[in-house]
Image: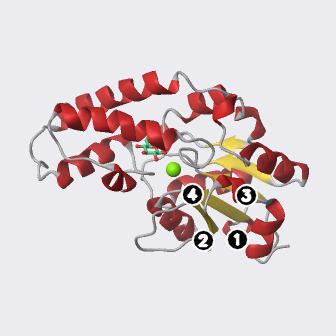
Amino acid sequence: MSCKAFIFDLDGVLTDTARYHYLAWKQLADQFGFHFDEKDNERLKGVSRIRSFEIILEINGAENRFTEEEKEKWANEKNQKYVELIRAITPDDVLPGVQAFLDDAKSRGIKLAVASASRNAPQVLESLKIADKFDYIADAGKVSKTKPDPEVFLVCRDALGLKSEECIGFEDAQAGIEAIHAAGMYAVGINVDVTSEEPDLHLKSTAELNVDRVLAAAGQA
Ligand code: BG6
Ligand code: MG
């Protein structure tokens, strides 16, 4: 079966917003005197805003410290910090190799989609000026189950009218690799901090992205 679509995570794959998510959570964690470092942050990649805050609380044995409303409030506060940070995003923030990779794939008729858990994804893609390259951008607000659940990848697959084996997913997070596999797709990892499931093809950075290489690795050259 030939590959008909590439489905991308956004944060940490198309641009380095994973760093901004970390900085915004770090500020909030510091406010409460919570421990939170870059290693802990790996567990937050790909998971929803509210679940991210719950993980920080779990790391600090503070699961019961806040009510559901308070958790919402602080998660929104983190989002306000994040939104301030992403205001500075420009097309220069598209990660190395990504523009050429998207253009090459598109010229070969491969469909492109974004499977991000972020409700800020449309804004980030607009600021990067790459939104119009994609055939489909999943609406994170309508996806009920967070990665490692495959839902967001399946939503993209269905919107494109394809089968799982015709899609290749790209992720920088462990939860994302699990989501791609659970969706029955081939998984390309970008600098993933692997703790359980290995991607099928693991690249050190987006600079290594190459359409022929990815298709060959997936046995579809
Ligand atoms: C994912 C990020 O893409 O989006 C997570 O990897 C983030 O770190 C999640 O928590 C939700 O993002 P947002 O912008 O809706 O808070
Ligand atoms: Mg990511």
Q: Nearer the viewer, mark 1 or mark 3?
A: 3
- Residue extending farthest left: 65
Of the pair 194 and 124, the residue shown nearer to us: 194
Which residue is the site of mark 4?
171
**For the residue marked with disc 4, what is the amino acid?**
Glu
In the displayed structure, would residue 80 be above or below residue 17? above
For numbered disc 4, what is the local secondary structure? strand
The disc at residue 209 is: 3
Q: Is mark 1 within 8 Å of ligand 2?
A: no
Mark 2 vs 1: CB contact within 8 A: yes
- Can residue 41 be seen by looking at this rendering? yes
Circle nearer the N terminus (3, 4): 4
**For the residue marked with disc 1, what is the amino acid?**
Glu
Of the pair 212 and 3, the residue shown nearer to us: 212
Does 70 sit left or right of 202 as displayed?
left
Q: Please name the residue shown 24% across and 28% down the image.
A: 73
Circle nearer the N terminus (1, 4): 1
- Can residue 148 be seen by looking at this rendering? no
Q: Is mark 4 within 8 Å of ligand 2?
A: yes
Cα gap from disc 2 to disc 1, whole angstroms = 7 Å
Does 69 sit left or right of 191 as displayed?
left
Residue 68 placement (x, y as % from top left): 19, 38
Which residue is the site of mark 1?
165
Circle nearer the N terminus (2, 3): 2
| Mark 3 neighbour density, 10 Å: few (under 14) some (14–19) many (20 or more) | some
Of the pair 54 and 94, the residue shown nearer to us: 94
